Image (cartoon, grey):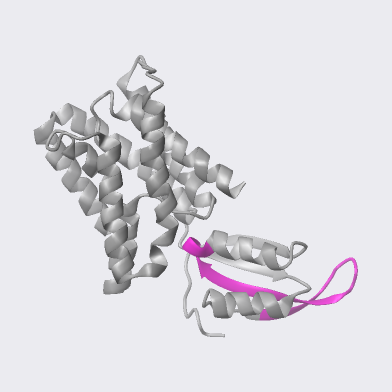
């Protein structure tokens, strides 16, 4: 299922670009948007430009911070490949309204990224730049990629027209909203409640592998009256799927309850 989601996600992104964004002369966000801007400057296909930009960013990131990089590699190769493959279908979809075109293209691209993140991989090397800058400056923020998007839209105004730039801005905003939902599930933190027969292995995975603190609560089952321990840990939303799948790999019969946490104060107090 993990690899199926990855393939579906990359395919949806490719279809979104080939059927809606590129035929209407729109621009997208991040490095994909940069590639579309370059198409009038360097006379090579857009998928190839996307691939070149992605590989340059991944290569530089490998030199700086290898731990953020490897999950971006496969999607960075598959998306341009699927863009080339789907371009041969020669399908033209003309929707009755521009707003509908914007909405449909944003859904295709946004949910494509969502599938990729749910598979455990990452896409959009602009977010890799964001992660590397966050690790380097110790200031993790989405401002870095937002600045790139603003510059892309400003350049696009002069390259095309203000009307195309406004439509593209809506695509960027809606797409990023869907992607952020997939990346962070809206919240910055998640709280895990875990009851497992393999407490030692789960605690080692949370503390040693992921580097998070945890707390143990002594409880008694309401039906069985059996005494158990609940492992409680608050983690960053970016490690949500990593912890969830990690626990299931250790103990597929573990009880796991996950809740949204909107603020964490004194994370290491206990």
Direction from residue 90 to residue 26 in the image, left or right: left
What is the quadrant of the C terminus in the image? bottom right
Task: Check if residue 128 falls in the magenta segment.
Answer: no
**Nearer to me, 190 or 81:** 81
For residue 78, say whether it is visible.
Answer: yes
**Nearer to me, 179 or 119:** 119
Going 30% across and 51% down the picture, which residue do you hit? 54
Coordinates of residue 147 in the picture (x, y in percent): 21, 53
Going 30% across and 45% down the picture, which residue do you hit? 51
Q: What stretch is highlighted in magenta?
A: 216-239
Q: Residue furthest right?
A: 224
Q: Is residue 11 above or below residue 31?
A: above
Q: Residue furthest bottom?
A: 270
Coordinates of residue 267 in the picture (x, y in percent): 49, 78
Coordinates of residue 246 in the picture (x, y in percent): 62, 65
Going 23% across and 41% down the picture, which residue do you hit? 35
Direction from residue 160 to residue 55 in the image, left or right: right
For residue 16, say whether it is visible.
Answer: no
Going 86% across and 68% down the picture, which residue do you hit? 222
Q: Is residue 13 above or below residue 177?
A: above
Q: Quadrant of residue 47?
A: top left
Coordinates of residue 59 in the picture (x, y in percent): 29, 61
Q: In this view, does 185 lie above or below 35?
A: below
Q: Number of marks in the image?
A: 0
Task: Check if residue 220 falls in the magenta segment.
Answer: yes
Q: In this view, does 198 lie above or below 111?
A: below
Q: Is the magenta stretch mostly helix, strand or loop?
A: strand
């Amino acid at each position: 299922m993990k690899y199926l989601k990855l393939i579906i996600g990359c395919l949806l992104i490719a279809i979104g670009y080939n059927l809606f964004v590129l035929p209407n002369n729109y621009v997208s966000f991040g490095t994909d948007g940069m590639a579309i801007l370059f198409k009038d400057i360097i006379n090579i296909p857009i998928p190839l430009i996307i691939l070149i930009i992605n590989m340059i960013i991944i290569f530089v990131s490998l030199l700086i911070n290898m731990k953020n990089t490897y999950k971006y590699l496969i999607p960075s190769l598959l998306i341009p490949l699927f863009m080339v493959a789907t371009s041969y279908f020669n399908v033209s979809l003309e929707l009755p309204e521009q707003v509908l075109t914007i909405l449909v293209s944003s859904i295709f691209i946004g949910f494509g990224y969502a599938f990729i993140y749910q598979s455990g991989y990452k896409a959009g090397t602009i977010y890799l730049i964001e992660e590397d800058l966050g690790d380097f400056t110790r200031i993790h923020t989405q401002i870095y990629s937002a600045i790139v998007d603003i510059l892309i839209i400003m350049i696009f105004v002069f390259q095309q027209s203000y009307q195309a730039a406004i439509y593209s801005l809506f695509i960027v905003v809606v797409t990023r909203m869907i992607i952020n939902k997939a990346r962070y599930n809206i919240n910055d933190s998640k709280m895990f409640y875990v009851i497992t027969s393999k407490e030692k292995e789960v605690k080692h995975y949370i503390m040693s592998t992921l580097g998070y603190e945890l707390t143990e609560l002594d409880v008694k089952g309401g039906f069985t009256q059996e005494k158990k321990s609940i492992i409680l840990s608050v983690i960053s939303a970016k490690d949500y799927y990593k912890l969830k799948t990690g626990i299931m790999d250790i103990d597929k019969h573990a009880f796991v309850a996950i809740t949204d946490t909107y603020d964490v104060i004194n994370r290491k107090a206990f």
